[in-house]
Structure formats: structure tokens, C-alpha cells
Amino acid sequence: MGEWEQAAQHDHTPGYTERLGAPLGSTVRVRLRTTLPVQGVALKVVQVGEIETFPAHEVSGCAGAGRWFEAELPLHDARVRYCWQLNVPGDHLNLTAMGLHHARRGFRSWFQYLPGHVAPEWAWKAVFYQVFPDRFRNGDPGNDVVTGEYEYEGRPVEHVAWDTPVSKEGDIHAHYGGDLNGVTQALPYLQDLGVTGLWLTPIFVSPSNHRYDISDYRRVDPHLGGEAAWDELVQAAGEAGIRIVLDGVFNHMGNENALFRAALEREDAPERQLFTWRDTPGKPPYHSFFDVPTLPKIDYRNEYAVQEFFSGEESVVRHWLRRGAAGWRLDVAHMIGGGGSDADNLPLHRALKAAAREERADAYVFGERFYDPEHALDGQGEDGSMNYHGFGLPVMQWLAGATYFGEPSRITGREVAEILWDAYHALPPEVALSMFNLLESHDIGRAHFRVGEDRVKFRAAFTLLMAYAGVPCTYYGSEVGLSQSRAGNMPWCREPMPWDEAQWDRALREQVKALIAVRRATPVLHSGALRFLHAEDDALAFLREVTHPDGRAERAVALASRRGEPHPVTLTLPEGTWRDALSGETLQGGAVTLDASGGRLLLSV
Ligand SMILES: [Ca+2]
């Protein structure tokens, strides 16, 4: 942030941007507010690789400090990039999404507008809860896998008791018996917690307990209760105000899938074209996920695969949206492609989303992109992606003092703010608000374990999760303190949910529930712009802000420390009266010193 911090403002909210998603070919009114002694303001727009200049004129009648300028932004392309130029005596400055600078920043830092874009705005208001079905709740012991019922990879599957600690040996073969019947039974629990969205890891017929090796994409695993349990869950969840996003494993399937069996059996089978055949010594004769032979990779070079999974009238994507799913989380979204590679990844995601939206106008589609997803998030394909890169990994690295692989780290709050801001500012606003934020998942170590079971640190993490731009998702059991028995990622992070309330941390659950309630009740957290207010080694704070057409602003501030004990932090709040969202305590804007341990959430009054 430069020396002119706050001297000029523009964002996607109504005071600055007349509306989002206006049609291609139209124009939209955009505004800038500044306290600088400007002599003139112009709008700069990228058109056909050139920078065009449009005049801005001063307008009056808006609240707040400074002067307001207005211009018409021409919407000539699917993604319009623009910035502002402010002429001041003897100087001029450029305002991009990154801030005010003398030099004009690169295009990735310019403001973005997506004409005609439709975002799944319900998801912005939602609080998601991730369920790993085998480990969440056993609603029907009668459908459990029986030990020795079938073999997978040459080993019999095993039924284990609910209180058996997870083990490396049981990674794939140990089935605990959780099912969709159990999720339905737990709906009152989830509703009480405040959850309004569920992401279920795969539920289709599969031999493993994680079900990322799907044998039949059109049938719910009978061990999860089958289609009847799915229909019942969708119905009951709908009545409870909870929508369900399914896990789409479209990069690879399981080797027991009938499509793959047919392809293996006959050289002239039409199913052959669904895979990429090869003759590489030491590797399976077909491309597969990380060369694992049980996970043959789907080849989208041909229409068969595209029609079967994405675009066809009866595609898998369409089938489950028709049957009640609210969207898709796309497993290893970055890998999907043709010819054994990620070729045509983005066009394929556009086809997938187009089909999903035809089936359900507000379907929420987000990809697992573990690393930097910026190149994929142009608004045409996925609505957002899982925000490991731009939120969960750096935040937890800071709080835990180590990466999820256990590499020690002394990353500072300043560096965390910098990476979060860098990732956020380069996304179109509706995409940034559709990012799927999380601290932990079935793939990486549990948050409680990583912060050494320190509840104060966990509350700090959870406060940031509930306040950050994007869709928050909490992992099953964390609300009652579920952790893991040893360091590492999967399978250690997949312990079964304790349903014996004596094992719960009830105080923690109340705190989590209160923060979820604040998130749901606070519109500025759903759609507000983001700006970092403060960062030091052990603390950081950010602001969410919605500016209304009359210039008035609605604000929220999240403040967090990585220390487990009281930690006073001094920062400057925007002017006005503020209220602590949990304690109700009020304070005045300006320089304030607050205890940041455990996280604070402040709302403008
Ligand atoms: Ca069961």
C-alpha cells in the first residue's frame, strides 16, 4: 500500500459500479472517489490490446469525504479491463485494483468487468460444511460394507468400528459405514450449527472408502444408501434450507468402471476412445492419475467423453443437477484435458459450466485447483476455485508455523496479507466472491492439529474464514474439536465424526456457531470489496466494504493474531462507530488498540 492509501477509491459495489453483469455491447456507469487535489480524471480501457481513454466528469450529492467522478465504461469484450488516471498539479497517478501508483501496473492488476456474467450469488451468502461420507454418520448399519465382501487391488475390503483410529493400512480398504442416511439424520444438527451448504466428497459407486475411483457415475453407492437415500437427503435438505454440491471426478475414473472394462476387452470398442493408450515401459498402457493403474485418465479429445460427462443431454453433470444437486466441485480441475494431458482445459471447463447452467441457472461450479488458479478464472469457466493458494494454505501456514507438509515456516502477517491480496486483486470481483475458502479438507491436515489444539488460534483462523471474500467452508467435526492422531495429511485427517456429545468441545461449538451466524447475517461479508488495513508479524486485519449509490458505506473488519495469548494490536479503523459482532462492545473509529487473539470481527454501526 502506497503513501496515498485511501486517497482514491473504486470497487465493484453499487456506489462505484452501477451494476454487475450488464450486457455485452452496452455501457455501465463507473465512479471514483478521491481526496487528492485532482485537476482531471480519465478512464483507461484496454481495447484490442490498446489503451483507450474516456473522459470522467465530476458529480455531486454523494456522502463521504472527497470528490466523485463518473465515466461510462464500454463493454466491448467478455472481460473488460480498466483503470483510472488522476491528474494532480505537477504529477499524475494511476488507480488500478492494486492501488494508486505513479507507474501504470500490468493488466493483471487492472479492474475487471465481466459483461453478461451471472454468478451463483446464493453461494456468497452460504456457509458450507464438507462431509466425507464414510466418516460422518452411519445412519443405516444395514448397508455397511461387510469385511471380505469384495476385493480391491487384490485385497479384501474391511468393515471397521466407528471408534477405530484411521490407519495407513486402512487408507483405501477400511470402511466405517457412514452413509447418506446419516447425513439426512444429521440435518437438524447442521441446521442448528447454521450450515446452508454441503459439499459431499464422491458418493457414486466405488470400491474404495474415499470413492475417487468411480465405477458408475449414475448410481449412488449402495453402501451410502443408493439413490433412495440421495433422493431423501435432497428433499430433507431442501426443507432445511441446505443445498448440496457434489464432487465431480472427471479427470479419471476407477478401473472397475464398465466403460474402462469395455475398452480393455476389445480393441474396436467405442469406449477405447475415452482413454489415452500408450506404450511406456514401467507404466500402465494408458494414461492415468499420477500413473496409478486403478485411475485411468479420461481423454476429452473426442466428443464421446465430452458428451458423456459434460455436454450431452444425459451427461453426468446434467443428470445429478436434475436430480437435486446444487452444483459441482470438480476434482483436480486443472488436470482435465485431452491426449493424456491438460490440453483444452479451459474450453472443457467452459463446456461443463455451460451445460450445468442450462440445467440449473444458479448451479455453483468450482474447481479443485490446488495451486495458483488465476489463469483459469476469467469468468467463462468455473465460477471460482477452491482457495488453497489465495487463502487457506498461507493463513494456516502462518497460524501453524509450518506448511501442510510440516516444513517449518516463519511467514509473517505482512507476507500473508501480501499473498492473499495478490491473489484476490487479480480476479474479477464476482469470481473473487465465488472462491471456495477453506482452512482444511479431506486432503490436508486438520486445522486443530496444525495449531497444536490451541482453541484461541483456531478461533482466529475461523474468524478470518467467515469474514474473507468468498464462500466459506468448514470441515466436518472441527466445530466440536475433531482432530487427528498424528502429523500429516490424508488419511489422518479423516477420523470419524464423534457423535457422543461427551467428546465434544461444546464451548468451541458455540463460538463456531456464533461466527457462522454473524457471517450469514452480514451482507457486507457476502458481497463487499476487500482491502487490507493492517499487517505485522503476528497480526493482520482486513476490511470488507459495500458503498451504496449515495456514497454511504457499510463495513466490517476482521482482525486476527497468531498468538494463543492476549495480543494488543493497534490499527486505524475508518471513522464512525463500530460494534464487536460477538461481544456487542462499541468503539469509535480512528486509531484503536484491541486484543486480536482469537480473532475479532467488527461491524460498522
Ligand atoms: Ca451405513
Image (cartoon, grey):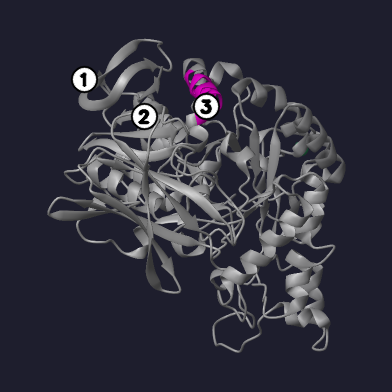
Q: CA distance from mark 2 to mark 3?
A: 20 Å
Compared with 566, 126 (above or below) is below
Q: Residue 182 got which mark? A: none
* Residue 265 vs residue 316, the one in the foreground: 316
The residue beneath circle 1 is 593
Between 147 and 333, the residue placed more toward the observer is 333
Give residue 402's position: percent from left, percent from top.
Answer: 30, 45
Which residue is disc 3 drawn over?
Answer: 479
Q: What residue is drawn where x is 68% and y is 63%? A: 352
Of label 2 and label 3, which has the lower sequence position?
3
Q: Label 3 crowding class (10 Å Cα cut-off): few <14, some 14-19, many 20+?
A: many
**Which residue is pictured at 23% across the width and 22% down the height?**
590
Amino acid tagged 3: Glu
Residues at marks 2 and 3 touching, judged by CB atoms closer than 8 Å: no
Residue furthest right in the image: 228
User: How far across and how far down the image is residue 404, in percent?
Assistant: 38, 48
Q: Is label 3 or label 1 in front?
A: 1
- The three-letter amino acid code for the residue at tag 1 is Thr
In which of the image's four quarters is ligand 1 placed? top right
Q: How far apart in space, not on screen, are marks 3 and 1 (Cα)? A: 29 Å
219 or 90, which is in the foreground?
90
What residue is shown at x 55% (from left), y 58% (from top)? Answer: 379
Q: CA distance from mark 2 to mark 1?
A: 14 Å
The amino acid on which the numbered mark 2 sits, given as a three-letter code, is: Ala
Q: Which residue range is magenta in the image?
A: 511-523
Q: Which residue is mark 2?
A: 558
Q: Which residue is painted at 29% across and 45% down in the image?
A: 416
Please report whichever mark, 3 or 1, sits nearer to the chain's N-terminal start.
3
Q: Can residue 387 be seen here?
A: yes
Does the beta carbon at disc 3 come under 8 Å from ligand 1? Answer: no
Secondary structure, mark 3, is helix
Q: Quadrant of residue 244?
A: top right
